[in-house]
């Protein structure tokens, strides 16, 4: 989005702009006018009509993130001219300023029994979960913000990851910012109740699909809110200012949360697919939501660096649940040691570098996730020890959130590790990665646990008060010194 900043020469004072200067500013202001989309959803929730009007110069083309969007597109017109898609692109050709395109989409919900991947379009009871890329055709070069206004049937709500405002007539207005258009995300339409929940430093925008019973809805909302408070114990505030949270029932799996994931398209979001038959206590003890929310302590990391973007949440899911008393300190250490053992048994001869490369081909997720978690544990303890408690992963991630965690591009692990080392003034993380990433076998978590004085025998956990890292071990499971009590 173009931003106007008055600039004065040494011989010009404020209030003395020339006519040419005002003309230049007027032109810039016109260029910064947002593109306005009117989105009408019919009662079936499967047909969507969009009128896209472009502020100032129209784009050369419209694109959709989904490869299937062209099959859902029934028609697109510019004036009286019919436009045809070529793959995921529709060329507009020569277009006058402030032109409007109108198009209609017929969604084709997924028919599989349960969702097993990322954002997709599917029926959830009476509600509709949609992949944004299936129906939103947007400018290829998005230099200008989009405003999306929704016209919905009576009683129908909308949940989206974008910044939300409510117009004077009550209609929802969303501001689509600068996250890249090819980042996936979801928008839900339906008869669900939408609720905003305030947590330290953030607002959670909750949508519970397929109408759970009031008692269960209240329990789920409480679980989500308490989990977010626990996550905020890392450094005193939730890692992002706004979060879309979509909860849907699923028939897949036996745990309380058989499937969950984070998306970043349009803004950060957590999507949970839950087993509604499980009692509320099972959700309170489950690590899935803490894990997904912990992803948000990092910016969007490239897919080839799963050891970092999954290793950090795998570590933090245990630490933060213990800090928030969702589990005991002993249980947190027991879960970590059990995870390290599973990871070490999986592809035991591979280096982390090789395992990370082959994770998708061989399904060795346990190996990669828990090896990354072992590195995070070692780094956290070493940071605390070498700095006499002044630094930790808590302080490093808090500084990362302030200086470097851009939400407008993907980052790689090397960049993030370098930033974390820079903000701590030490090379702890970089040294650990360089020493262990290419080394054969699983990171030596047993030596780390011994130095921390943690002994796990079956279900019994004992702590050695005389261990070299005993103080650092105890500090891990307490709310950070930088987090308000």
Image: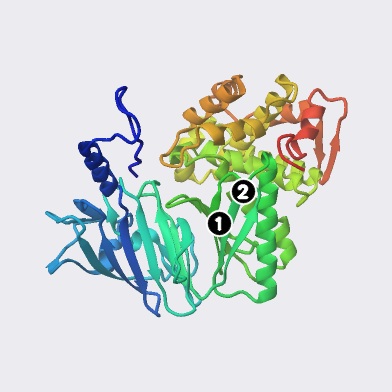
Q: Residue 426's x, y, as percent?
A: 61, 19
Q: Residue 242's x, y, as percent?
A: 54, 52
Identify the residue at image location x=55%, y=56%. 260
| Visible residue check, residue 472 | yes
Side of 144 relative to 424 (left or right): left
Q: Residue 218's x, y, as percent?
A: 68, 69
**Residue linked to disc 2:** 291
| 2 in relation to 166, above or below | above
Give the camera-side residue of 13 and 230: 13
Label 1, label 2: how far apart the Cα atoms are: 9 Å
In this figure, which colouring scheme has been used for the structure?
A: rainbow
Side of 406 relative to 340 (left or right): left
**Residue linked to disc 1:** 260
> For numbered disc 1, what is the local secondary structure?
strand
1 and 2 marks in contact (CB < 8 Å): yes
Identify the residue at image location x=42%, y=78%. 153
Badge 1: residue crowd in 10 Å (few <14, some 14–19, many ≥20): many
């Amino acid at each position: 989005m173009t931003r106007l900043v008055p600039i004065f020469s040494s011989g010009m004072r404020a209030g003395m702009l020339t006519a040419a200067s005002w003309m230049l500013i007027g032109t810039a202001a016109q260029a910064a006018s947002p593109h306005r989309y009117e989105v009408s959803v019919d009662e079936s929730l499967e047909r969507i009509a969009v009128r896209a009007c472009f502020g100032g110069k129209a784009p050369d083309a419209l694109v959709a993130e989904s490869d299937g969007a062209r099959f859902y597109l029934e028609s697109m017109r510019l004036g009286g001219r019919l436009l045809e898609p070529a793959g995921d692109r529709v060329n507009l050709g020569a277009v006058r300023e402030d032109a409007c395109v109108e198009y209609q989409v017929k969604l084709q919900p997924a028919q599989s029994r349960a969702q097993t991947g990322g954002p997709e379009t599917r029926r959830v009871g009476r509600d509709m979960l949609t992949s944004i890329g299936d129906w939103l055709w947007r400018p290829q070069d998005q230099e200008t913000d989009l405003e999306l206004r929704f016209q919905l049937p009576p009683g129908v709500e909308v949940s989206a990851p974008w910044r939300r405002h409510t117009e004077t007539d009550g209609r929802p207005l969303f501001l689509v910012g600068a996250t890249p258009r090819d980042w996936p995300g979801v928008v839900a339409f339906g008869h669900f109740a939408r609720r905003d929940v305030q947590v330290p430093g953030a607002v959670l925008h909750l949508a519970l699909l397929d109408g759970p019973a009031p008692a269960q809805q209240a329990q789920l909302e409480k679980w989500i809110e308490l989990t977010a408070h626990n996550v905020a114990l890392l450094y005193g505030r939730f890692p992002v200012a706004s979060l879309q949270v979509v909860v849907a029932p699923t028939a897949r799996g036996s745990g309380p949360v058989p499937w969950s994931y984070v998306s970043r398209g349009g803004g950060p979001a957590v999507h949970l697919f839950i087993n509604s038959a499980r009692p509320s206590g099972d959700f309170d003890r489950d690590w899935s939501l803490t894990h997904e929310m912990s992803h948000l302590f990092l910016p969007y990391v490239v897919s080839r660096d799963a050891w970092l973007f999954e290793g950090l949440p795998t570590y933090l899911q245990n630490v933060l649940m213990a800090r928030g008393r969702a589990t005991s300190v002993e249980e947190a250490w027991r879960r970590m040691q059990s995870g390290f053992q599973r990871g070490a048994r999986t592809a035991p001869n591979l280096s982390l570098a090789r395992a990370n490369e082959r994770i998708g081909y061989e399904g060795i997720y346990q190996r990669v996730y828990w090896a990354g978690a072992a590195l995070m544990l070692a780094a956290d303890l070493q940071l605390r020890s070498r700095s006499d408690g002044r630094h930790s992963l808590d302080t490093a991630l808090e500084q990362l959130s302030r200086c470097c965690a851009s939400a407008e591009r993907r980052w790689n692990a090397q960049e993030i590790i370098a930033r974390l080392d820079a903000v701590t003034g030490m090379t702890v993380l970089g040294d650990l990665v360089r020493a262990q990433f290419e080394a054969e076998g699983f990171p030596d978590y047993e030596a780390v646990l011994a130095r921390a004085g943690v002994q796990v025998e079956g279900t019994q956990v004992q702590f050695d008060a005389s261990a070299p890292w005993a103080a650092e071990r105890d500090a891990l499971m307490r709310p950070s010194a930088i987090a308000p009590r």
